[in-house]
Amino acid sequence: MTVAEKILARHWVTDLAEGAIGVAAVQPGDTGFVRTDLRFSHEYVTPMAATFWDDFAGDEAGLNEPDSILFFRDHLAFLDQVMTEERKKMGLLDAAHALHDRQREFAAKQGVRLHGALPDRVGSEAICHVMVQDRYALPGTVIIGSDSHTPHAGCIGSVAFGVGTSAIVNSWATRDVRLQVPRSVRVRASGVLPENVTAKDMIIEILRHPYVKGGDAIGKIIEYCGEAIEELGIDERATLTNMAAEVGAFTGIVAPDERTVEWLIERRGMERAEAEGLIGGLSSDEGAEYEWTLEIDASSLRPMVALPGDPGNGIFVDELEEEVPVDIVYAGSCTAGKREDFDMYAKVVREGLQAGVRVPEGVSAYLQYGSIDVEAYARERGYDRLFEEAGLTVLAPGCGACINAGPGVSTSSEQVTVSSINRNFPGRSGPGKVYLGSPYTVMASALAGRIATYEPEAAVPA
């Protein structure tokens, strides 16, 4: 079996009445119920699910094991800063606030942990995916969430996938979710990534492959492996698993390894024996079947961008036919609001400041944390002072401009944005044109005022 199939087999429900869980093996096509370890939803879905729950279970019914349920206020925390007066008059802002109120009330009633709005400023405790990875996900677990980027947590060897409102409601009653075991696709990356090339460049390369662009990866489990993947930190692996959503996959996963063990020790304070025990047996067998394998030579990659309109429109930056001036820079989102992303942002900014380079006039540059934990990490290292000195507007955690709901959105079709978010579909972040890039490329572009690449130790972005 593949590592994902092993995890699903361990969680397969065989007799609900007797509480029997686990089978020797599963294979693609098997259909049944899987016991979840963690269930989460955000303010887009929780209120609707709560209404369904009250209607069908009864408003006095309690949720099944609320300690393994999480709610998040992340998507709409900054909406009032960018919503037009016309839309406010239509009642849309009031409706958005009502979603938050309903989630907060239901969480309090049901005893569910809500990572909500910040008490002292605009923002939220975290984007759900960033905090689920940092505080809750564990190797070998099954996680469901009310968002397409739930595969983010696959970076540490969990099977994490997005589900709809009905599945969330059902899981509140049983902890289980129904699925058909998908087929698996393997992405094997050999070699070593160049210093200025990241997991974001790698996923843009994957997204432009004919197999993916043709839709053949839709609904599959994407397993990332190979020398280049093994060298990535957990946050960088999360970029790959997160953007399994853009691939159209059921989920993305990286088998846990020694790097995972070290991360659990450092981030979660685990003893080595406990961390090593969690990853035992969590690797794909040599005879595991994959529908297809995509081979990537990581050492041959160069910084990339996805041209406006689709994340699959990837090209190498040095292949742009002409210089692309930018009006807006937005760095952040669940894909690129993690600790390692901020290490990259800070590295570019520090070298830029040393060379006397700041964000030029006429460019609006925003940087948004993925969680209060990431914000604390950045502040401890003085990154916040670097960013402000360079002329960046630093925002509290939240989803924001990625979903057209916060500072950094465009306001006209002529504006050009370069961003580290995961999607650049028309209208996704306003009416303008959005180029996607890595944290290095996005921050280098902020300092250059045009799409540029980060060249280590260079005086100015290239």
Image (cartoon, grey):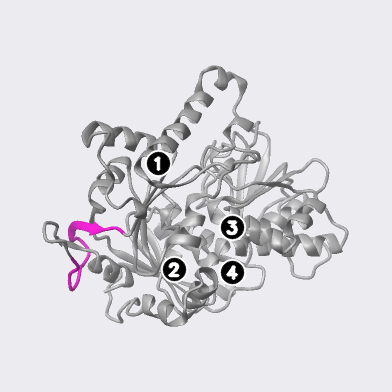
Count the marks: how many?
4
Tell me which amino acid carries mark 3: Asp
Towards the viewer: 109 or 192: 109
Disc on the earlier residue, 2 or 3: 2
Front: mark 1 or 4: 1
Residue occupied by mark 4: 301
Using the numbered discs, state the Cα–Cα distance from disc 3 to disc 4 in whole angstroms.
Answer: 32 Å
* Other residues around mark 4 within 10 Å, as few (<14) / some (14–19) / many (≥20): some
Disc on the earlier residue, 3 or 4: 4
Residue at screen point 59% across, 66% down:
198
Residue occupied by mark 1: 107
* Other residues around mark 3 within 10 Å, as few (<14) / some (14–19) / many (≥20): some
Where in the figure is residue 164, as x and y percent of width and height?
32, 43
Check the image and report above or below for 295 versus 380. below
Where in the figure is residue 456, as x and y percent of width and height?
75, 70
Q: Is residue 156 left or right of residue 198?
A: left
Using the numbered discs, state the Cα–Cα distance from disc 3 to disc 1 in whole angstroms.
Answer: 22 Å
Disc on the earlier residue, 3 or 1: 1
Check the image and name the residue furthest to the right: 356
Asked which secondary structure carries label 2, the reply is: helix
Using the numbered discs, state the Cα–Cα distance from disc 1 to disc 2 in whole angstroms.
Answer: 28 Å
Using the numbered discs, state the Cα–Cα distance from disc 2 to disc 4 in whole angstroms.
Answer: 24 Å
Asked which secondary structure carries label 4, the reply is: loop
Q: Which residues are magenta?
A: 21-36
Q: Please identify the dominant SS of the magenta region.
A: loop
Disc on the earlier residue, 1 or 2: 1
